[in-house]
Amino acid sequence: MEPTRRPSLRRDRGAVDVSIQMLFGFMAVLFVMLLVFESVAYWHARNVYDEAAVEGVRVAAAYDGDCAHGVAAARDMIRRHAGGWGTQAVVTCTSGTTMSVTVDGYTPGVLGEQFGVRVRVVESAPKEQ
């Protein structure tokens, strides 16, 4: 007498089902990696622009400094640290008892320049007397 087989409670997943699940899993991992890379690019660009604004306001607020020297120092720092992607950054300065340097530009996007994020950094310091 032949033993009777019970139907299996586990359903057999075909190769197509597994391939579709792997495809969606791969796309999710790829999306998370691009998000991480984009975040790193944003913070790097923000740090470069922030350091340029700090250097610009330090030069502008010095006893013998002015806005022209501060803007030139900030642009030079962006050129040295950012390279090609920082060429579109706009540096402005306001003078008075408190000097203020603003750097406004875009971050390099991971997938291309058009996917970058706008960054605006303002630094201030009292003018030396």
Image (cartoon, rainbow, N blue to C red):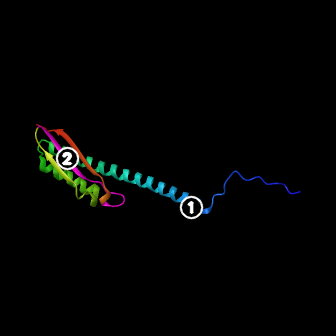
Q: Which residues fall within the magenta stretch?
A: 97-113
Tell me which label, 2 or 1, sits earlier in the chain.
Answer: 1
Q: Quadrant of the C terminus?
A: top left
Residue sitting nearer the eye, 94 or 10: 10
Residue annotated with mark 1: 19
**Residue depicted at 54% across the width and 60% down the height:** 20
Q: CA distance from mark 2 to mark 1?
A: 51 Å
Label 2: element kind: strand
Three-letter code for the amino acid on which mark 2 is drawn: Thr
Would residue 54 be visible to someone looking at this image? no
| In the image, residue 108 lies in the stretch drawn in magenta | yes
Q: Residue furthest right?
A: 1
| In the image, residue 4 lies in the stretch drawn in magenta | no
Residue annotated with mark 2: 102
Q: Position of residue 128 (x, y in %)?
A: 13, 38
Q: Quadrant of the N terminus?
A: bottom right
Q: Position of residue 95 (x, y in %)?
A: 11, 43
Rate crowding at label 1 as few (under 14), some (14 to 19) or many (20 or more) other CA atoms within 10 Å: few
**Residue depicted at 22% across the width and 47% down the height:** 53
Label 1: element kind: helix
Left or right, 118 with reference to 38 = left
Q: Which mark is residue 124?
A: none
Compared with residue 30, is residue 97 higher up or lower down, i.e. above or below? Answer: above
Left or right, 108 with reference to 90 = right
Residue sitting nearer the eye, 113 or 56: 113
Three-letter code for the amino acid on which mark 1 is drawn: Ser
**Residue depicted at 20% across the width and 51% down the height:** 74
**Residue depicted at 30% across the width and 60% down the height:** 113
Residue sitting nearer the eye, 104 or 69: 104
Compared with residue 94, is residue 29 higher up or lower down, i.e. above or below? Answer: below
Would residue 119 be visible to someone looking at this image? yes
Q: How many marks?
A: 2
